[in-house]
Each structure stands twice: as C-alpha cells, then as structure tokens.
Image (cartoon, grey):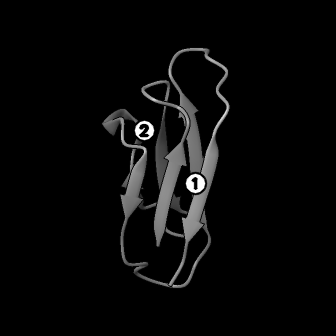
C-alpha cells in the first residue's frame, strides 16, 4: 500500500495503524506525508491525517493498494 498526503507541507502528517491488532505502522510524530509498506495481513487499516496544533488543513490523499 502506498499513501501520499499532498498539499499540507509541514502542517500535517500521516498516522497509519491496523484496526484489529492496533499495530502502528507510522505515527504522526514522524512528520511523514508519504509512506509505503506491504500489508502484513487482512484487516481494516486506519489512516489519520493529523494537523499540527489546531491548524485546519486542506489536502489530497492518494491511497494505492496493489
């Protein structure tokens, strides 16, 4: 799965985790806006867009699952 958060600059970051196992794959504190990884199992994955502070951000989120 590839996830790209566009249009936020340094104003927001990604957080991705598995719903069933609560395993974090990326946390927003990393500041990353792009992340790619192999899905380890079949489950729901939660993708959060976390703004810095109380900012309001406009963004485009592109998710590709192969």
Residue at the limit of the structure toward the left, as seen here: 30
State left or right for residue 26 relative to residue 53. left
Image height of 13 relative to 25, above or below: above
Residue 10 occupies quadrant: top left
- Residue 43 location, x and y as percent? 58, 78
Question: Looking at the rendered structure, which numbered label has been put on residue 20?
Answer: none
* Mark toward the start of the polypeptide (1 vs 2): 2
Question: Looking at the rendered structure, which numbered label has been put on residue 47?
Answer: 1
- How many angstroms separate mark 1 from mark 2 (CA)? 10 Å
Which of 45 and 36 lies nearest the eye of the viewer?
A: 36
Residue 63 occupies quadrant: bottom right
- Residue 24 location, x and y as percent? 41, 56
Callout 2 environment at 10 Å: few (<14), some (14 to 19), or many (20+)?
some
Which of 59 and 39 lies nearest the eye of the viewer?
A: 59
What residue does disc 2 label? 28
Q: Is residue 19 visible?
A: no
Query: Image point 61% across, 52% down: which residue?
Result: 61
- Residue 53 location, x and y as percent? 53, 15
Q: Is residue 49 visible?
A: yes
Image height of 33 relative to 8, above or below: below
Contact between marks 1 and 2 (CB within 8 A): the answer is no
State left or right for residue 9 relative to residue 49. left
Residue at the limit of the structure toward the top, as seen here: 54
State left or right for residue 25 relative to residue 44. left
Residue 31 occupies quadrant: top left
- Residue 40 location, x and y as percent? 40, 80
């Amino acid at each position: 799965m590839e996830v790209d958060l566009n249009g936020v600059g340094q104003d927001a970051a990604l957080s991705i985790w598995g719903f069933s196992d609560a395993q974090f794959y990326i946390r927003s504190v990393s500041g990353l806006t792009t992340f790619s990884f192999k899905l380890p199992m079949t489950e729901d994955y939660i993708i959060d867009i976390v703004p810095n502070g109380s900012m309001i951000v406009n963004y485009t989120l592109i998710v590709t699952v192969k």
